[in-house]
Amino acid sequence: MRVHTLQHVPFEGLAALEPALRAAGHEIAVTRLFAGEPLPSPDALDWLVVLGGPMSVHDESVHAWLAPEKRLVRRCIERERALLGICLGAQLIAEALGARVTRNREPEIGWFPIELAPGAEASRFGRALPPSAVAFHWHGETFEMPRGAVPLARSEACENQAFAFGERVLALQFHLETTPAAAASLIEHCKDELTPGRFVQAPEAMLADPARFERLNQVLAGLAKALP
């Protein structure tokens, strides 16, 4: 399968998802939007992975590539390509499906529990997620649930954490791909977002337990089996 990744900043990549994709025999290509690289045609890919980033979906005046990226996401949905969106990527998919992206009531940064949303079992993605897990989060915005989507997960800080749209589109507000190195990079480059709050952890708390990342990546491995 031809997997094409859209990367918004140098410090947010595929992390643990990359070795999983390569082990499954997939080809991986990357468009580094921050470097001005051109977007692919939907015909050149089987699966689009849209990664996270500190910008908002509304920042088109600052990041001119957001507008053509949104068009590509919509075209991939229309052509029934497989899509995985993570954090900002999930918000871009939600907007492409007609849902609003707004500020979350509080920032959610660090390790916090998620749980399955009611009815999540109606989707094969929901059936591949555990009833609850401790996920890694780094976001200040959230999405409304698109019409026709199946809600998959929620947390205390954020009601809409994930959704499936049909059998080929998966949007995750939280991060399952994060490794210790990826988390350290986020802390280094986005430390200005670490303002005191109920759902904002200190850097040392985020990095204190390496085994947490292993458990997180195991959840990713289980979910990956349900991906197209």
Image (cartoon, rainbow, N blue to C red):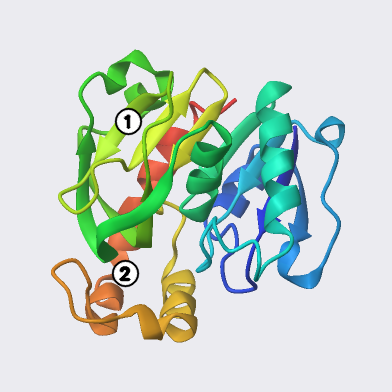
- Residue at coordinates 40% horizontally, 32% vertically from top-left? 163
Instruction: Give neighbour class at mark 1: few <14, some 14-19, many 20+ (Cα, 10 Å).
Output: many
Q: Nearer the viewer, residue 110 or 98?
A: 98
From this view, report whether residue 83 is shown above or below residue 165. Answer: below
- Residue at coordinates 31% horizontally, 52% vertically from top-left? 215
Q: Position of residue 95 (x, y in %)?
A: 52, 40
Q: Secondary structure at mark 1?
A: strand
- Residue at coordinates 55% horizontally, 46% vertically from top-left? 92
Residue at image mark 2: 210
Return the residue found at the far front: 61
From this view, report whether residue 125 is shown above or below residue 11. Answer: above
Residue 62 picture quarter: bottom right
Check residue 152 in the rendering and tell me which mark sits there, or answer none.
1
Q: Is residue 217 left or right of residue 228?
A: left
From this view, report whether residue 9 is shown above or below residue 86. Answer: below
Q: Is residue 47 left or right of residue 172?
A: right
Residue 133 picture quarter: top left
Residue 119 picture quarter: top left
Looking at the figure, which quarter contains the C terminus? top right
Query: How far apart are the alpha carbons under marks 1 and 2?
Result: 26 Å
Q: Secondary structure at mark 2?
A: helix
| Circle nearer the viewer, 1 or 2 | 1
Identify which amino acid the numbered label 2 is placed on.
Pro
Q: Position of residue 120 (x, y in %)?
A: 29, 23
